[in-house]
Image (cartoon, helix red, strand yellow):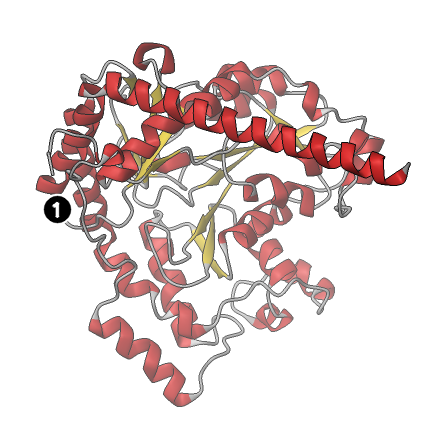
Amino acid sequence: MNVSTLAILGGRPIAQHAKPRFPAFDRATIRAATSLLERGETVGLGRTNETITRVEKIISAYHGGREALVLSSGHAALMCALMGLEIGPGDEVITTPYTWGASTSCILAVGALPAFADVDPVTGLLDPAGIERAITRRTKAILVVHIFGQPADMPAINRIAKRRGLFVIEDGSHAHGATINGRVVGSFSDAAGFSCMGGKLLATAESGYLVTPHKDVFWKAAMMCQHYGRSAEQGFPEAFKPFADSLVYTFRLSPVIAALFPGQFRRLDAQVKARQENAAVFEHGIKDCPAVILPRSRKGFASSFYYSTMNFDPDVAGISRETFCKALIAEGVGAWPYVPDGIHHWRRLQWKAYDGPKPFWLPWLEDAHTDYAALDLPGCDHKVERAIEICLVSYYKPAHSLMKRMAAAFTKVMDNLAALRAHEDDQKRTHAKRDSRIVAAAKRAAASYGTRKK
């Protein structure tokens, strides 16, 4: 096989490799979890449980002493942030249309209305100017997503929030260990939610956590999503005690999963550093690819590189993004767009013409005359059309040689664009012939049916 021939055309892959096992747990972590199972200690109702107490202290210390609440998922953490801030029906929460759906569904789950602001067309992060344009008299909060591990512009967003009297919520589910001027994300807001499921930078099983600088927000969240026995814990506000009951969502975490946190936190900073170094090697290797646009680095803003994101220019390459990604995948580089479409286009938000299984939020979207499909969000549309992401979460150890091979795959594909154009044209002709045969067969079947009917 010829190494210079693209793998998609029969050549040898340049970056094929076995992905590292992830998540990975050290022996002490495995012993801690199995010990709890052996003792039958699978339920923890709060800080009466030693493991839950320890983990919440670790999370608090990592986030500068903020109140910390361990939860069953990142989505639960975002819901608790909203409930702790008493956001609900009639309120609007500005958020991003360019991300995973949990940062929108959590808003809908508390009865509030998502209001989508535009994003930067290269990073995919919320654009402060877009936030300004989205503010109305009903706006109560801004929910910011640090997508792909990139820190959003929290100084600018907080200035807007302070001037307009709004709460700020961070979704750090992609961004454990990302920093702004040395300060970790999740520490710039009234409340922040993190997912710690097995595919995240801080990977456990299914879990998450909330952090907040406000004790009342912490206890309001705990009242809504934990066993009401937590009202007996030290620090629970006396004024809240008459209202403590079992009208709660069960978002608490098992100690068995909580036991996975300490070891993962011990290794987090070293793993983030390794990913940052790996990403630097990889992105240096592709920075001169003419059809690839990388986000510009900002002084003081350090991504934790859950993914490396970039934009692809099909006009420069002369091939589609789909063909480019298929060629990279054949070479051993997992390349695809993470976000299929802006959330404002998703069908289950379109109450005017919806005929599927009915989501519970459609009636109040209709009552508010919310028309997400009419939104003009050019930054989001541009990013959706051109984005390519490379997942780096598994590369938590130095892998510079592999990163160079992955970058070389980009160069190899770019050096063979003429062959790829011919391949793409051939694929189009093949599909056109197949479609033509299908249409012809359908016409023959219709004609035959008409003859039999006569």
Mark 1 crowd level (few <14, some 14–19, many ≥20, 10 Å Cα): some
Quarter occupied by the N terminus: top left
User: What is the quadrant of residue 29 in the picture?
Assistant: bottom left
Residue at image location 36% in from the left, 29% down from the top: 388
Q: Is residue 90 visible to the viewer in this orientation of the structure?
A: no
Front position in the image: 92 or 173: 173
How many numbered circles are shown? 1
Q: Nearer the viewer, residue 322 or 195?
A: 322
Specify the amino acid type for callout 1: Pro
Q: List x then y, in percent, for residue 399.
A: 12, 45
Which residue is situated farthest in the bottom direction here? 39
Q: Is residue 152 left or right of residue 90?
A: left
Q: Quadrant of the C terminus?
A: top right
Pick out the residue farthest to the left: 401
- The structure residue drawn at horizontal position 39% and vertical position 43%, both measured from the top left corner, is 174
Residue 332: percent from left, percent from top = 23, 41
Tell me: residue 134, above or below residue 341: above
The reply to whether residue 43 is in sight is: yes
Task: Write down the quadrant of residue 293 in the picture.
Answer: top left
Q: Going by the image, does 309 lie left or right of 246?
A: left
Q: Which element is circle 1 on?
A: loop
Tell which of 324 and 198 is nearer to you.
Answer: 324
Residue labelled with disc 1:
398
**In the image, what residue occupies the spot 25% across and 16% down?**
418
Instruction: Give residue 140's position: percent from left, percent from top.
Output: 65, 31
Residue 254 in the figure: left or right of residue 85: left
Q: Position of residue 358 (x, y in %)?
A: 78, 46
